[in-house]
Image (cartoon, helix red, strand yellow):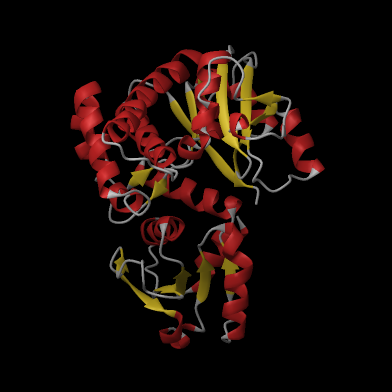
Amino acid sequence: MILVERIKKAGRIAIYGAQATACGVASALIDVFGNVPEAIIVSNLKGNPIEIRGVKVIELKEAFELKDCLILVAVPVNLHEEILSVLCRNGFTNYTTIDSDAEYELMSLYYKKVRRFPLVRDAAPADAIPNVKILMARSVFDKELSDADLLNFNKRGIQEIHAGAALSEDRIAEITDKDGDNISKHNRQFSELTVTYWAWKNVEADYKGICHYRRVLDIPEDDYNKLSSVDVVLPLPFTVYPNASSQFLRFIHEEEYNALLLALREIAPEYYVAAHKFWYEPYLYNYNILIAKEKIFNSYCEFIFNVLFAVEKSFSDKGIRQNNRYIGYLGEILTSLYFMVNEKQVRVAHAKKLWLV
């Protein structure tokens, strides 16, 4: 809680970054600490909003009067070193980064304040630890994980699986997503969802889980006995501004969004109706990572893949070949939709997402 104490003592605060992490940090500062940031600082205004929660977004070259502020660097972890170097070169000395731990602590306080999205650590312990099988999707393009990381994952029962194995001559894990009932050859479009599909069709366990080499649900070993008290574990959602659709439309084209809506209307009309509510709220689950009871995991998979296959077919029928990761992004949207719609019927708890690289 060192960051919390530093925020309380800081007085003037500014945020570096204007996307999802920064939006959450701004909301936490305003609603938990009553501290409205002096500004949101970015390297370039292009592609960024003009304001977040009423706080103006400015370029770094306009921020020199903020050198006495505590600067919270709220950008993806892989950009931290670059941004700190930029701040240092421009004479800023009072700054700190928002890493996985800091983001989790700030957003835990925020969601407690707004009474949404309870935590695994606050769930009731059970008498026994359930049988949990978690697969970590890996591809031939991933960076190598350290031996310490791998040992840590093995202790938690996380097994590596080669994602997109049907597209590679190499084999990078003992388990591959091309065995059994699979969609491995579609990995370029579906990304880690080829592993989700594989787990749906080929894994049996009390709880099934999916993570990938860059992002893992960080559940301490002491909390594994709390899993039986919940149905699903998800990462804390992003708080986005002004709403979820403004975030995901940065990554997909309008034709893909419209194809998703059409598929929802035809296949799952109740979710089509709900989408028009939930996609204009400020919360969004990202990364397609989760741990869920087998029945719920399978139900979730049946929903998202029925819709995604319909979207893919609609482009195929039109003779349009999509080569990007659009299906993976649509999967994130559907994951949010499914669990937001069912949050009162399913006991959802949340854990920290750990960034590895």
Nearer the observer, 209 or 26 = 209
* Image quadrant where residue 267 sits: top left
* Image quadrant where residue 91 sits: bottom right
Residue 356 appears in the rendering: yes
Nearer the observer, 90 or 321 = 321
The residue depicted at 42 percent of the width and 40 percent of the height is 285
Q: Is residue 320 left or right of residue 135?
A: left
Nearer the observer, 13 or 232 = 232
The residue depicted at 53 percent of the width and 32 percent of the height is 120
**In the image, residue 247 above or below residue 169:** below
* Image quadrant where residue 265 sits: top left
The residue depicted at 44 percent of the width and 17 percent of the height is 296
Q: How many marks?
A: 0
Residue 158: where, in percent of width, then height?
68, 28
Residue 111: where, in percent of width, then height?
41, 44
Q: Is residue 33 left or right of residue 159?
A: left
Residue 93 appears in the rendering: no
Image quadrant where one finds the N terminus: bottom right
Residue placed farthest to the front in the image? 319
Residue 211: where, in percent of width, then height?
58, 34
Residue 336: where, in percent of width, then height?
37, 36
**In the image, residue 335 above or below residue 111:** above
